[in-house]
């Protein structure tokens, strides 16, 4: 196999490469003066099984174009199979029509990746599971639950009972699955979102008094939901509140908002490369998903089961 990295998250690609003991394929991914994307594969890939590691995170459009142009370059270089490894799939929150005359951009992006020439997609914790069906090519949607559960258990103390909390009704399945792994209780926060980017906590379903609460979500963007949820849980008598989130978008003043919140810590995967603000933050920490992605790549290359990773 060959592993190739674009520019969105090279440290993660290097970690996957190290896990598999396969050197990164040499390629030039650069810009012309007018910011057009240009890609040149600097090694022979004819007949090879190639894996491109690229998150479509900020700047989302630039990183998406890098991925599409790289896929096209590999297809025209006669690669046998091209797998797009997309740790964070941008546009996933636009998975349905939320109002009249609005797009379903997640489907559009899936079409673009397929048309560019990808043979397969490997991604992590899609915002909505049905996005797998948007692709007309095989798509593996990994989950970060085993990585989170292992980290929570390694940092668990015996002083207080754990309660896993879903910050909204839509994340109940994810929270319940992690609670089952940890043999912990489950609570749900019922919130009302008045407009995009703003949320108001309405009610807590479940008993969190004297509990060590773990909020679990797939994406943290403005961090408003997490911070409001943490405040509500502390008011309800929780001993402490931490959060485990797969994709740390953290746009705008999100890092400062987390720092000023009751959150003891925010733990994220490295599906999105950390900014300097994240790296120096006192209560934000990243854990690596390179072993998870690397093992999935190995199993795909060897035509073995990927789902058995989570059993």
Image (spheres, rainbow, N blue to C red):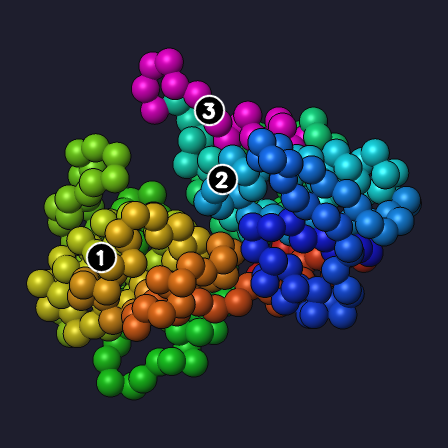
In the rendered structure, the answer to whether residue 184 lies left or right of residue 69 reads left
Point out the frontmost of discs 2 and 3: 2
Q: Nearer the viewer, residue 179 or 228?
A: 228
Residue 44 in percent (x, y) is at 89, 49
Name the residue tied to disc 3: 104
- Looking at the picture, tell me which residue is in the foreground, 281 or 134: 281
- Residue 113 in the magenta stretch? The answer is yes
Please name the residue shown 30% across and 73% down the image: 282
Circle 1: is it few (<14), some (14-19), or many (20+) Cα within 10 Å? some
Instruction: Classify 295 as above or below 203.
Output: below
Part of the protein shown in magenta: 98-114
Badge 3 crowding class, 10 Å Cα cut-off, few under 14, some 14 to 19, many 20 or more, is some
**Residue under the point 71% across and 57% down:** 297
- Residue at image location 42% in from the left, 31% down from the top: 94
Asked if residue 124 is positioned above or below residue 148 in the image, the reply reads above
On the image, the x and y values in percent for residue 67 come to: 64, 40
- State the quadrant of the C terminus: bottom right
Residue 165: horizontal and vertical position, in percent? 28, 59
Give the alpha-carbon distance from disc 2 to disc 3, as whole Å.
16 Å
Asked if residue 310 lies left or right of residue 104, the reply is right
Q: CA distance from mark 1 to mark 3?
A: 30 Å
Quarter of the N terminus within the rendering:
bottom right
Q: Any mark on residue 151, and which?
A: none
Left or right: 75 in relation to 233: right
* Local SS, label 2: helix
**Residue pointed to by mark 1:** 257
Badge 2: few (under 14), some or many (20 or more) residues near its Cα, within 10 Å?
A: some
Residue holding disc 2: 60
């Amino acid at each position: 196999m060959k592993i190739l990295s674009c520019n969105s998250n090279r440290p993660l690609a290097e970690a996957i490469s190290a896990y598999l003991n396969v050197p990164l394929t040499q390629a030039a991914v650069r810009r012309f003066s007018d910011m057009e994307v240009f890609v040149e594969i600097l090694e022979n890939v004819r007949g090879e099984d190639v894996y491109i590691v690229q998150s479509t995170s900020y700047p989302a459009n630039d990183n998406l174009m890098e991925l599409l142009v790289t896929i096209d370059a590999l297809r025209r270089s006669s690669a046998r199979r091209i797998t797009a490894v997309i740790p964070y799939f941008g546009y996933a929150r636009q998975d349905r029509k939320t109002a009249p005359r609005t797009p379903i951009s997640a489907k559009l992006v899936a079409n673009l990746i397929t048309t560019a020439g990808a043979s397969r997609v490997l991604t992590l914790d899609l915002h909505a599971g049905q996005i797998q069906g948007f692709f007309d090519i095989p798509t593996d949607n990994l989950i970060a639950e085993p990585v989170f559960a292992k980290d929570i258990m390694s940092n668990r103390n015996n002083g207080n009972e754990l309660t896993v909390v879903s910050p909204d009704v839509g994340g109940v399945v994810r929270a319940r699955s992690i609670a089952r792994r940890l043999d912990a209780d489950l609570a749900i926060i019922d919130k009302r979102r008045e407009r995009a980017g703003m949320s108001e906590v309405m009610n807590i379903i479940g008993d969190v008094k004297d509990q060590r609460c773990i909020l679990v979500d797939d994406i943290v963007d403005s961090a408003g939901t997490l911070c409001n949820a943490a405040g509500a849980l502390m008011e309800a008598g929780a001993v402490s509140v931490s959060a485990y989130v797969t994709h740390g978008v953290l746009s705008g003043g999100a890092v400062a908002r987390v720092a000023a919140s009751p959150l003891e810590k925010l733990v994220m995967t490295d599906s999105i490369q950390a900014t300097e603000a994240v790296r120096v933050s006192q209560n934000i920490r990243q854990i690596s998903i390179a072993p998870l992605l690397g093992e999935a790549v190995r199993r795909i290359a060897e035509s073995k089961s990927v789902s058995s990773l989570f059993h």
